[in-house]
Image (spheres, grey):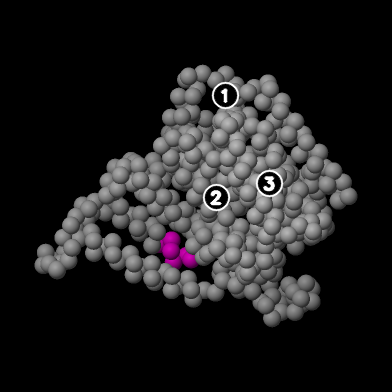
Amino acid sequence: MAVIAPGALASLAALFIGPIPQDPNCHDFADQRVFFEIPHFGDVITNIGFEMYYLSGWLSGHSLKPGRPWGVAVVDHAPAALRSSAQGRCLLGAPRMERLNEINMRKHQLDGLRFVLFLMVFATHYAPNPFHVGYLGYALPVFFVMSGFLITNVLLSADHPSLLTKLKVFYTRRFLRICPAYYLVVLLLIGMEALTYPAYYLAYLFNIKLFAVSLSPSAAFYEWFLQGWRDESMHLWSLSVEEQFYIVYPLLLYITPPRYRTTMLFSVLVMSIAARFWFMSRYPKSFYGTLLPVCAEYFVWGCIFSWLEYQQRLPRFSPPWTLSLSMIAILSLIGIEFSLGQSGFLQFSTSHYQTPIALSMGFFIWGLWSLPESHLVVRVLSFRPFVYFGTMSYTLYLVHLIAMNLFNSLDLKLPLPQQIGVVAGGFAISLLMATAIWHWYEKPIYALRRYLPYR
């Protein structure tokens, strides 16, 4: 996929470059119409089909077998005993063994789901009035539940003898995956002088600052929030919550003896629900929904389902039925919540519907994880473009509001209604920026994880 990055940057650069002079007679029989100051725009745009045809052919030449990430050469013929032995690790190579281990923890349908969830978040943030499509904002809690599920799976798969080694490996790998792209975007925003509280962004504490500022809500506060939401990329508060969860949870899981982990997880769940009740009664108009004690309920439901799956205590549930019924439950609860006007202020001020919705999301993630590869939902979500962009959904989430501001600053005029043009232009720039950052910046850094295997 690295070949896509140069093309992505070239396409982005083409926005700033004027038309290339040519012989005036070379296009006498071509479409003469001009858009965006590009002569013969019809001819230019129709060539995109040839590029897409080439890209699809290139992708089809890279087989995507079940459970096999792109670009990973798996030694299928190596005996299990060889792969698990010290001699096998020496012959096959520790980095390759690490990739083999990671295959068991990756599901393509979850990558596809990540991209679908990003599209929902994107639609919410680009809507003229996000509150009119606030139900799409529930994509964010699904991300939280999925994070709890997958991180628990990763932590339980670690096979190092000492607690310190397990924590060192986990925290270092998380840093390599999350922090480089995050700080790149934050520093860009600081360089643009777009942030009111840059220190809190840098310290992964912006969610706490947002809550603190909201404790005394005023017209000035709401004006700052509504005007600065897109300019300051305030959606990054959710990444502060995730980082705080990643710091606290591994230590809590590892220091708890296995026989007490179920009790520990449900205890944390009860404390999170109690914290939400307390904030709702004490600070009902504040942004308490941005705090980890409140958001923890989503993470912990994912952790519980992952832990129960690890212990094989969910065998009686049918994954297809679980997925279908949980999806119906999620949509029904959200529909009732919004139709009764009890949805609060999106995730910033949540309602009492959070608990049943979060529980349903836990069943949904487990059901999707456990589906057989032949299931229609798995095949749809494993659609290659979904999987490809799903792997960089984190980067897309980081840059999509910057892409909107960039498109508006370029003052480009698409042959579309204004709002649709902003959505189309912002989406295209988001894909280009995320692809370039992922292939040229994030991926090389994250590749260093091969020196810190979980096993």
Viewer-side label of 1, 2: 2
What is the quadrant of residue 48 in the picture?
Answer: bottom left
The C terminus sits in image quarter:
bottom right
The residue type indicated by label 3 comes to Ser
137 above or below 215? below
Could you say which is closer to the camera, residue 214 or residue 447? 214
The residue type indicated by label 1 comes to Ser
Horizontal side of 68 relative to 366 (left or right) equals: left
Q: Which mark is residue 360?
A: 3
Q: Is residue 361 magenta?
A: no
Q: Residue furthest bottom?
A: 77
Q: What residue appears at the point 31 percent right and 42 percent down from the top-left corner?
A: 418
Residue highlighted by disc 2: 117
Dot 2 falls on a residue whose secondary structure is helix
Q: What residue appears at the point 30 percent right and 48 percent down from the top-left corner?
A: 416
Q: What residue appears at the point 48 percent right and 66 percent down from the top-left corner?
A: 1
